[in-house]
């Protein structure tokens, strides 16, 4: 993530205007100048519309305050979470060991705050982070690479010291690992509830669900089963945080290859509040997918096509959603010879991965079907179904969303233009089609928005970030209740709640 000294305080390398403000800074929530022209090899020039941002938000002081605010808010969240059982840490009312809390355990144990007051306070901190994120993007040109890197690293270190935040799957990762590696039960045909005498049972949230995680990720977690649970827990945390930093570095490297300012990529991705609070703070395995998928982009940009195809298969073996990038890699390869190399690499990598899956798990596959029928209140299919009187995301509506997704991807693949932006729009369409949407899903599209040339894509991602932050705030449920608005109150929503209750309890 380092940058040449001549670029640190100057404009991005891509099409600067007369005032030295680069295109990427100009599109970061209006952080740049009024007009800019983008010229990419093989792409038409784009004219950016005039964007108006208060001058005060583009000053160096505003940028520094924004970065400091993000770090301070994260520190406050971690200190609160380590003080004892809280709404921030799942299942902490049932089980909350000092090794789970981390080295800061008990520093605020004497502070007692009511549940409602705590929810509003935590929501306020996340909203402050969201506002600071916008200011950091607006003041991007005034921020040095060193300052941005220091903020991102500090944020990761702080999050590493605390327990996993809301909506985490950490206990499930360890549960499935011990189910197969220690107890000899196939996690794709058995459930965590069948190891109820294992201490990991108290950390897991999906007790009656066959594993939805990819075979490569599951295989990688098996060695953790033979370690003491606290050691395995901290290994997952450290590896996840390290992969997150590697992912940001890869995005910045791709930005350099495209002639973009890597500071923009670092801020857009690495300081997004959903990225920090839910993805890194929840220690999610999406980074095991994002590192190889982003590496595939970097390899393709470096004309190492066969390696790009092979590395992408590693991402697919962690989470199948990464396969969405493959057709766009083929478009980015441009020539038939390079496309053949990408396909060859993908096939050569898929063969040992399939053999590994068959050896460890037989013909069993990740359980994506049940999870795909669950609804979150503010997923787009559920909101649409609720609005038109279907009771939420009805099965027929979900099938229609899948068909629309396929049509959108085909249309985007056939379009001329920036393949990275098109891959980003396809990922937005994927998120919009899902019935079960979690906050960290937004990080799937962040690198593509940072690297692509589409201003509309970046604005859409920022709007999506605001929407998801607001709907997943710790106090949001209380606020929607006061407004008598419950998107899960319909027939489809109630069916989803019943299934969710069945899958989270055992027997």
Image (cartoon, helix red, strand yellow):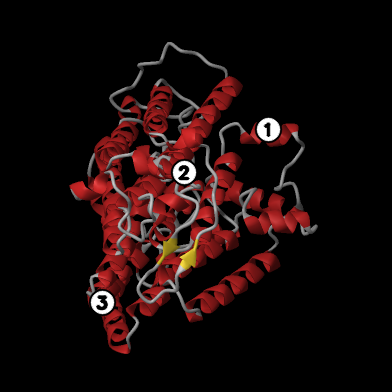
Q: Secondary structure at mark 1?
A: helix
Left or right, 362 with reference to 405: left
112 relative position to 38: left or right:
right
Q: Residues within 10 Å of mark 2 (few under 14, many from 20)?
A: many
Residue 274: give its label. 2
Task: State the separation of the CA atoms marked 3 and 2.
Answer: 32 Å
> How many labels, in total?
3
Q: Looking at the rendering, which quadrant does residue 149 occupy?
A: top left
* Circle 3 SS class: helix
- x then y, percent, for residue 456: 53, 59
Residues packed near mark 1 inside 10 Å, few (<14), some (14 to 19) or many (20 plus): some
Coordinates of residue 273 in the picture (x, y in percent): 45, 40
Image position of 297 with respect to 495: above or below: below
Disc 3 to disc 1, C-alpha distance? 50 Å
Marks 3 and 2, the one that precedes in the sequence? 2
The nearer-to-camera label among 3 and 1 is 3
Quick check: 297 above or below 260? below
């Amino acid at each position: 993530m380092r940058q040449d000294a001549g670029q640190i305080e100057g404009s991005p390398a891509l099409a600067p205007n007369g005032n030295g403000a680069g295109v990427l800074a100009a599109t970061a929530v209006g952080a740049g100048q009024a007009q800019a022209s983008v010229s990419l090899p093989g792409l038409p020039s784009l004219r950016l519309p005039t964007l108006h941002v208060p001058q005060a938000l583009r000053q160096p002081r505003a940028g520094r305050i924004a970065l400091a605010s993000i770090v301070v808010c994260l520190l406050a969240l971690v200190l609160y979470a380590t003080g004892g059982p809280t709404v921030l840490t799942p299942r902490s009312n049932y089980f909350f060991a000092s090794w789970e809390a981390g080295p800061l355990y008990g520093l605020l144990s004497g502070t007692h705050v009511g549940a409602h007051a705590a929810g509003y306070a935590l929501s306020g901190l996340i909203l402050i982070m969201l506002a600071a994120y916008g200011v950091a993007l607006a003041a991007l040109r005034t921020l040095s690479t060193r300052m941005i890197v220091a903020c991102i690293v500090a944020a990761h270190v702080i999050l590493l010291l605390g327990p996993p935040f809301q909506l985490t799957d950490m206990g499930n990762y360890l549960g499935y690992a011990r189910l197969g590696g220690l107890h000899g039960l196939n996690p794709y045909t058995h459930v965590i509830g069948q190891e109820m005498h294992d201490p990991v049972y108290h950390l897991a949230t999906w007790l009656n669900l066959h594993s939805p995680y990819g075979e490569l990720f599951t295989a990688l977690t098996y060695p953790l089963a033979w370690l003491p649970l606290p050691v395995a827990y901290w290994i997952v945390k450290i590896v996840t945080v390290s992969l997150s930093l590697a992912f940001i570095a890869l995005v910045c490297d791709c930005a350099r290859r495209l002639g973009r300012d890597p500071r923009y990529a670092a801020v857009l991705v690495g300081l997004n509040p959903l990225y920090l609070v839910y993805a890194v703070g929840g220690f999610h395995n999406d980074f095991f997918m994002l590192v190889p998928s982003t590496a595939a982009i970097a390899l393709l940009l470096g004309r190492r096509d066969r390696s790009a195809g092979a590395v992408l298969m590693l991402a697919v073996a962690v989470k199948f959603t990464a396969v969405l990038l493959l057709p766009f890699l083929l478009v980015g390869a441009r020539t038939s010879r390079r496309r053949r190399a990408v396909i060859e690499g993908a096939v050569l990598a898929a063969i040992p991965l399939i053999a590994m899956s068959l050896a460890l798990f037989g013909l069993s596959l990740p359980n994506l079907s049940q999870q795909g029928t669950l609804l979150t209140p503010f997923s787009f299919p559920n909101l649409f179904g609720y609005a038109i009187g279907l009771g939420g995301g009805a099965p027929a509506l979900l099938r229609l969303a899948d068909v629309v997704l396929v049509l959108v991807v085909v249309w985007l693949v056939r379009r001329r233009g920036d393949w990275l932006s098109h891959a980003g729009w396809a990922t937005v369409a994927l998120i919009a089609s899902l019935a079960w949407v979690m906050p960290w899903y937004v990080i799937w599209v962040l690198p593509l928005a940072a690297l692509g040339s589409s201003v509309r894509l970046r604005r859409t991602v920022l709007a999506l970030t605001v929407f998801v932050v607001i709907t997943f705030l710790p106090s949001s449920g209380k606020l929607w209740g006061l407004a008598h608005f419950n998107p899960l109150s319909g027939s489809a929503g109630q069916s989803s709640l019943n299934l969710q209750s069945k899958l989270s309890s055992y027997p």
